[in-house]
Image: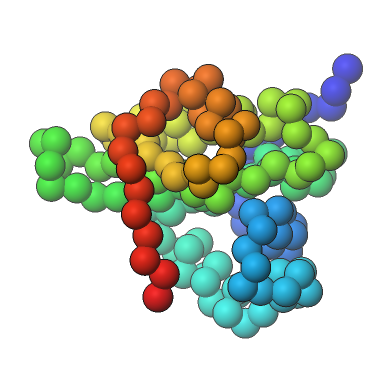
Amino acid sequence: MPSAMIIRAAIRSDLGAILRLLRELGDTTHTQSAYVRMSSAAVRAWTRMENDPDRTVLVAERRNQIIGTLDLLVVPNLTHDAQPWAMVDNLVVDPDTRFQGVGRALMEDALDRATRTGCYKVELLSHESRQGAHRFYTALGFAESAEGFRRYL
């Protein structure tokens, strides 16, 4: 029987583990060592994030190990009777624990939080090449509904 997993809001002492997981996203603008050590920029960003009442970084934890994370941002809104909407970003599961329900548990917690906050929708972006991720999001009830554009600065 697998050990219990908990989903919770991340705390400052989780930052190192979160940064290690985020390496899996393949961000090539930083070296791996930059992710592992907690740069002053990462600590400053974390401080802003943890002080933002509309931002929650979730972690999945099993046996005192962080095995997954995602970032949930609730966005105030003037349309839809001023109901907020939410954005999910940076969903990552440790490669050794994929296909064990970790991502689903993180997403279900994020969807529950968005619902309790009164959000009328939850959006996320996924690179067009990540077909497995697209099947996962579709299984969770997400639908392709827009074409995205980016401009890196």
Res 91 seen here = yes
Side (left or right) of 63 relative to 52: right
Res 14 seen here = no
- Residue drawn at x 62%, y 82% is 40
Side (left or right) of 80 relative to 149: left
Relative to 149, is 109 above or below? Answer: above
Task: Specify the farthest residue to the bottom.
Answer: 40
Residue 46 occupies quadrant: bottom right
- Residue drawn at x 76%, y 69% is 32
Q: Position of residue 49 (x, y in %)?
A: 48, 63
Q: Nearer the viewer, residue 100 or 149?
A: 149
- Residue drawn at x 65%, y 68% is 28
Quadrant position of the N terminus in the picture: top right
Relative to 147, is 48 above or below? Answer: below
Task: Specify the farthest residue to the top.
Answer: 1
Q: Position of residue 84 (x, y in %)?
A: 25, 42
Q: Position of residue 56 (x, y in %)?
A: 49, 50
Marks counted in the figure total 0
Q: Position of residue 139 (x, y in %)?
A: 53, 20
Residue 21 occupies quadrant: bottom right
Q: Which colour scheme appears in the figure?
A: rainbow
Side (left or right) of 75 relative to 102: left
- Residue drawn at x 11%, y 36% is 81
Task: Specify the farthest residue to the front.
Answer: 129
Q: Nearer the viewer, residue 126 or 49?
A: 126
Quadrant position of the C terminus in the picture: bottom left
